[in-house]
Amino acid sequence: MTEADIRVLVVDDDRAIRRFLRTALGAHGYVVFEAENGQQALRDVVAHRPDVIILDLGLPDLEGVDVTRRLREWSQVPIIILSVREYEEDKIAALDAGADDYLTKPFGVGELMARLRVALRHAISQVDDAAQFVLGDLRVDLARRVVEVRGLEVQLTPTEYSLLSMLIKHAGKVLTHRQLLHEVWGPGYQGEKHLLRVNISNLRSKLEVEPARPQYILTEPGVGYRLRSNV
């Protein structure tokens, strides 16, 4: 994954800080999304599938610590706290909630970039660098997030890739609609089966030779879906 592929969600109610970070991160090739409050951040994590989050603690609707806790209920995306709060108890609370790092304002761009690289390396190291999932003509490089079908790279949306990764993680097992919706979209989406159906249909159209007669992603009627472990 190159820097140009890395999506960063900046969550801060200070427009000047967001603008500064967008410029600084953009200059290093990162793709930047912005949220000005906690609720928007939670929605944007589902919508944009960021690879890392830069999060302020003092948001107008939710504390950054609460946003971190809610994200950790279903996501392991790296979270770097960027806050004016420099007291030890604030840092401990954020890290205990699941944040990966803590940087106080004012900060240097060089240090922020270094912290970003460390957080991303740590996230990637959690996946076996040699991890390859192969099923017939389908090959997925889990470390590089590259999907190929019959030797040709296939472009998936962030949500489609997250869904495929979840199916690969549990290949051969039936995953219920609720499980997939919770793990891929997050809490509150368990009843949105149409989202799942649309994304499964899109995945099949990109991965299957005959999407109407799928060989990889199988439907378990009334229950959910299963990715074959062999063909």
Image: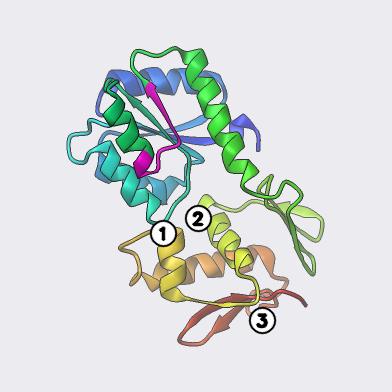
- Give the residue at mark 1: 185
Please tell me which residue lies in front, 89 or 186: 89
Q: Are marks 2 and 3 in contact (CB under 8 Å)?
A: no
Q: Are marks 1 and 2 in contact (CB under 8 Å)?
A: yes
Indicate the amino acid at tag 1.
Trp
- Give the residue at mark 3: 213
- Could you say whether the residue bearing mark 1 is in a helix, strand or loop? helix
Percent across and percent down for residue 104 are: 35, 19
Residue at screen point 34% across, 65% down: 189
Indicate the amino acid at tag 2.
Thr
Q: Residue furthest bottom?
A: 221
Which comes before the other along the chain, label 1 or label 2?
A: 2
Which comes before the other along the chain, label 1 or label 3?
A: 1
Separation of disc 1 and disc 3 at Cα? 26 Å
Indicate the amino acid at tag 3.
Arg
Separation of disc 1 and disc 2 at Cα? 8 Å
Q: Nearer the viewer, mark 2 or mark 3?
A: 2
Quadrant housing residue 173 = bottom right
Residue at screen point 65% across, 38% down: 1
